[in-house]
Image (spheres, grey):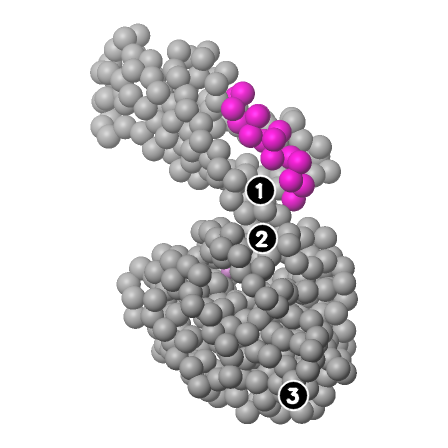
């Protein structure tokens, strides 16, 4: 049983240091696999702790283990550490010092909460039966970091985790409330690149060219009928074209046009239908106009599926440590993606949303900054999960 009052007191003790640390991390954002200064900051913070820190598996990751006072299961807690190529306009005094790069997804807050959790749990280590694996993971935004760490054997290192949890700050939810739900919660996200090749020439002589611009436009509209005509309307599926590029002058028809986009879905069996539908549409439309086509379809994120037992544990920890009203009952699925999904394919666990405020600025926007008021309930929850899971 988690000692709630004592837990909240110890979280309150570390909070001022964690708020400053969050601001320090916010100033030095780094994008995927470039997180060198971020990683150095994390390692410096943990340097005088009793955590056993592993040599990096991918250069910028930090993986540590806190052993409890007696034997028991291992729980994995994960924070992402990368930033986004966004020019920050949050107005915060601790705004990014790096032009064109910012913590617009709040991973600075996630890191600060997990480091605070390490401090708090260290003070409770004698009460832990088992161990806590701390994972500071690079490159979440590229669907690459989590997958790469797992391919490097992260989840096979002894002691192997029996449960895995992560938090993500969530605008649109009241401050400090938490939520999760069993089943698919975030979507799979794949990407595709289409090259439509024709034969360019003078804009005044369309009969002498094979126009890839008109053909690309037909490909765009053709692709929009895959979801509406080939998918069960009860399923949630998205296909978006996000980049179209071709030509350099207003009087020259180019040789080729490129299209790039993404697909989102919850049921992995739909990937084949999407991939095949895109291939058929691109080839058919291009053949009809005399163009040729090339399609590269790449699998990105898998769907994020929370496990019932982990959601039940989280709800019980949140309601007992923070109060019954702190568990937010609404947890709508989102077509956004998250690479914690790769952990949850291997280990039972859950991703929890942590409310940043109902009117909080959206993730990935230039105005975004993490809400410091959400740090305390975040640290209480992560610490409470470990204390409960590794309870004597
Ligand atoms: Ni994020």
Q: Is residue 226 magenta?
A: no
Front tag of 2 and 1: 2
Number of labels in the image equals: 3
Q: Which mark is residue 342?
A: 2
Towards the viewer: 351 or 33: 33
Distance Cα–Cα, label 1 vs label 3 = 45 Å
- Element marked by disc 2: helix
Mark 3, residue position? 126
Mark 1 surroundings: few (<14), some (14-19) or many (≥20) residues within 10 A = many
Assess mark 2: CB under 8 A from ligand 1? no
> Mark 3 near mark 2, Cβ–Cβ under 8 Å?
no
Above or below residue 66? Residue 144 is above
Left or right of 248? Residue 319 is right
Distance Cα–Cα, label 2 vs label 1 = 16 Å
When asked about the image quadrant of residue 293, the answer is top left
- Element marked by disc 3: helix
Read off the magenta span. 266-281
Mark 1, residue position? 264
Q: Residue at x 55, y 66 (%)?
A: 78
The x and y percentages for residue 81 are 45, 65
Assess mark 1: CB under 8 A from ligand 1? no
**Location of the N terminus (image quadrant):** bottom right
Q: Residue at x 60, y 74 (%)?
A: 132
């Amino acid at each position: 049983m988690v000692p709630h009052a004592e837990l909240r007191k110890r979280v309150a003790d570390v909070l001022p240091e964690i708020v400053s640390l969050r601001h320090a991390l916010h100033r030095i954002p780094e994008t995927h696999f470039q997180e060198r200064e971020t990683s150095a900051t994390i390692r410096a913070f943990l340097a005088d702790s009793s955590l056993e820190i592993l040599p990096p598996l991918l250069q910028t990751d930090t993986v540590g283990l806190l052993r409890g006072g007696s034997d028991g299961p291992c729980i994995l807690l994960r924070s992402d550490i990368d930033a986004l190529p966004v020019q920050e306009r949050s107005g915060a005094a601790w705004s990014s010092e790096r032009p064109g790069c910012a913590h617009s997804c709040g991973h600075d807050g996630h890191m600060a909460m997990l480091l605070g959790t390490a401090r708090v749990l260290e003070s409770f280590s004698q009460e832990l039966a088992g161990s806590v694996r701390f994972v500071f993971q690079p490159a979440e935004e590229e669907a690459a970091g989590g997958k790469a760490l797992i391919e490097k054997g992260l989840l096979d290192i002894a002691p192997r985790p029996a449960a895995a949890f992560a938090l993500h700050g969530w605008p649109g939810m009241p401050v400090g409330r938490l939520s999760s739900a069993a089943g698919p919660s975030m979507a799979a996200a794949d990407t595709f690149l289409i090259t439509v090749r024709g034969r360019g020439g003078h804009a005044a002589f369309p009969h002498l060219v094979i126009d890839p611009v008109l053909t690309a436009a037909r490909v765009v509209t053709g692709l929009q009928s895959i979801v509406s005509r080939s998918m069960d309307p009860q399923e949630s599926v998205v296909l978006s074209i996000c980049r179209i590029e071709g030509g350099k002058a207003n009087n020259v028809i180019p040789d080729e046009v490129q299209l790039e986009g993404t697909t989102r879905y919850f049921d992995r069996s739909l990937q084949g239908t999407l991939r095949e539908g895109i291939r058929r549409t691109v080839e058919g439309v291009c053949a009809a106009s005399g163009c040729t086509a090339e399609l590269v379809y790449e699998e990105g994120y898998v769907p994020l599926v929370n496990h019932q037992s982990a959601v039940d544990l989280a709800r019980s920890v949140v309601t007992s440590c923070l109060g019954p009203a702190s568990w937010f009952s609404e947890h709508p699925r989102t077509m956004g993606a998250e690479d914690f999904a790769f952990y949850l394919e291997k280990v039972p666990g859950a991703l929890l949303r942590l409310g940043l405020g109902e009117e909080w600025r959206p993730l990935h926007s230039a105005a975004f900054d993490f809400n410091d008021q959400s740090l305390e309930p975040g640290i209480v929850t992560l610490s409470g999960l470990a204390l409960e899971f590794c309870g004597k």
